[in-house]
Amino acid sequence: MTLGARAARGWHCLAHRWGRVHRDPYPEAMDALNTNAEYGASTWSWVADQVELYESTGGAEGATLRDTGLPIIIMATLGHKSGLLRKVPLMRVEHEGAYALIASKGGAPAHPGWYHNLIANAAVQVQDGPQPFNATARLVSGDERAEWWNRSVAAFPPYAEYMAATDREIPVFVAERTDQ
């Protein structure tokens, strides 16, 4: 992306923040995720610790959500405000090589921070095992969202409780490989 395009995108983000434009909810990925960006570990120690353990062992350890025994993936995004590389463990919901990214935040009233990162830049990196891969995430709706939501609840039943606990519709993204 050219410097001019980046500047225009930056202005668009500011204008959006000030409520002056409507932002496309399905942005194209700017480029492949810049994994050389400075890493900004989560301020939640359990998240940072799990990411570090998972990555340092190639997924041999830290591959389940805390004490649940349920599998997770690591998703990396670029911080839309900070520009830092951000990594979070998410429940593993895979279907035919694509992955659901559920922005539940445990049923909290607000979306997780990474939701805003994906709205700003759909380029992500997913790690499900020893090697991460590049992907593009897209927000899904309608019947496609319903299918992915049902898969997600089957993989992690507390998602249904999270949905009942909040007034917002929990966003569902689908990440599809770009580097095959």
Image: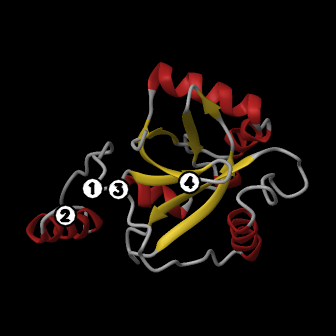
Q: What is the x, y in percent for residue 137?
A: 43, 44
Q: Residues within 10 Å of mark 4 (few under 14, many from 20)?
A: some
Q: Earlier in the sequence, mark 4 or mark 3?
A: 3
User: Marks 4/1: CA distance?
Assistant: 19 Å
Q: Amino acid at mark 3?
A: Ala
Q: CA distance from mark 4 to mark 3?
A: 13 Å
Q: Residues within 10 Å of mark 1 (few under 14, many from 20)?
A: some
Ranked by sequence position, the earlier of labels 2 and 3 is 2
Q: Is residue 115 above or below residue 85?
A: above
* Image quadrant occupied by the C terminus: top left
Q: In the image, 84: left or right of 157? A: left
The quadrant of the rendering that contains the N terminus is bottom left
Of 68 and 140, the residue lying toward us: 68
Q: Quadrant of residue 21?
A: bottom left
Amino acid type indicated by mark 1: Met
Is residue 81 found left or right of 96 in the rendered image? Answer: left
For residue 67, say whether it is visible. yes
Colour scheme in use: secondary structure
Give the alpha-carbon distance from disc 1 to disc 3, as whole Å. 7 Å
Q: Nearer the viewer, residue 150 or 29?
A: 29
N-terminal label among 2 and 1: 2
* Residue at 73% in and 62% down: 54
Marks 2 and 1, how far apart at CA = 10 Å
In primary-sequence order, the first of circles 4 and 1 is 1
Q: Write down the residue under mark 4.
A: 132
The residue at which mark 2 appears reads as: 9
| Label 2 close to label 1 by CB (< 8 Å) | yes
User: Which residue position holds label 3?
Assistant: 32
Residue at numbered disc 1: 30
Q: Determine the CA span between mark 2 and mark 3.
A: 16 Å
Q: Secondary structure at mark 3?
A: loop
